[in-house]
Amino acid sequence: MRIRTTRHGIEFTSDYQNSPIQYIIETGQWLDTILSETTDRHFPILATLRAQGITHYVMAPLIFSNRIVNAMSWATDAPGGFTEADVELFRDFVTTFVPVLEAMAVRRIYGELLATYVGRDPSARIMAGAVQRGDVRHLKAAMLLADLRGFSRLTDELPEERIVELLNAFFDLVVPGVIASGGDILKYVGDAVIAMFPITGEDPTPACGSALTAAQTALAALQAAPKEIQQHISIDIALHYGDVAYGNIGSGNRLDFTAVGRDVNILSRLELLCKDVGRPLLMTDTLAVEVAEPVIEIGHFELRGFRRHQAVYALCQEGEQPCRPKASLARA
């Protein structure tokens, strides 16, 4: 059995128009047809099945308790198609199976909605019952924070609708690279996004490399973006490797699933340095020591709220001499 979630807006596409699924949803009736040139005209998508040797196609409406109509279909390449007994079995099957499918669909929808708003791993944990305040998970991870530079100025100069468009454009530059590199979006914080790349096993190098790849992908995407996007959007990115604590915080019955801890704070403080040092991408020594690309030490900086000065690195630019951090100090 295959369960398919259709993309948003599919009802306005040519694939949907004059399709069996449109017929089922709009009429609520079964479709039981031997494929022929006539069905090709009524349902052009079935012509593809007929060309592949399918002889008989049956689609049933699945009417859930909220009256939403879904569908289930069967097809055969048997020369005579399905028998009457086959179709009758399908009808009995649908009656029995609708409650099971509805429960599965609801859980799937809830899971997808949660993943959309809180991320894949937090979604899985919440669905598994991690909903108590103070329920926190600790792990080692490479972290990325990307921020839209000059956002306050933009909000003063542009209408709200345009601000929303630019925010979405900014996230479209950053998020695809994170997902493609195996990361998980933890949080959207106004005009910034926090992502993590969990360590699998004992070696942090793959996760740190993935975080750097995601950052480079975002900056490259900005360089390739239309001029009207480049005119308003500049991206500052900070990378760090350390401990992540994330889970439920809040009060009463309103909780938030968020990331907290010392290393998350280091990440946010590091991003603020990008503008001051004139680099769109900065990283701590703990991450820099794990990546293959040549890096250069920018300096040691006092981060607000931290007693110890932080060694800060950037990717080498043309003419600069690489200077890698020492692994023993970076991991201390």
Image (cartoon, helix red, strand yellow):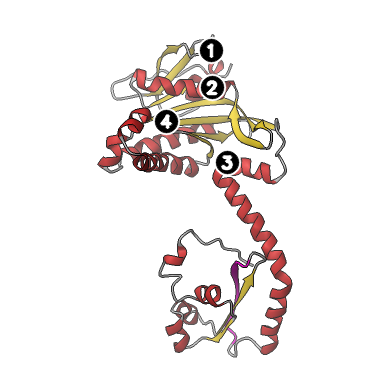
Name the secondary structure under disc 3. Answer: helix
Quadrant of the image containing the C terminus: top right
The residue indicated by pointer 3 is 118
Q: Is residue 6 above or below residue 285?
A: below
Badge 1 density bin: few <14, some 14–19, many ≥20, Cα 10 Å: few
Q: Which quadrant of the figure has residue 30?
A: bottom right
Badge 3 density bin: few <14, some 14–19, many ≥20, Cα 10 Å: many
Question: Would you say the residues marked 1 and 2 are in contact, meaning their CB atoms lie under 8 Å apart?
Answer: yes
Q: From the viewer's side, name the closer residue of 99 and 317.
A: 99
Name the secondary structure under disc 1. Answer: loop
What is the distance, in whole Å, between disc 3 and disc 1 at their CAs?
29 Å
The residue indicated by pointer 4 is 147
At which x and y percent is residue 103? 69, 60
Please report whichever mark, 3 or 1, sits nearer to the chain's N-terminal start. 3
Task: Tell me the tag on residue 306.
Answer: 1
At which x and y percent is residue 284? 48, 21
What is the distance, in whole Å, between disc 4 and disc 1 at their CAs?
21 Å
Question: Would you say the residues marked 4 and 2 are in contact, meaning their CB atoms lie under 8 Å apart?
Answer: no
Q: Is residue 267 left or right of residue 229?
A: right
What is the distance, in whole Å, between disc 1 and disc 2 at their CAs?
9 Å
Residue 92 visible within the image: yes
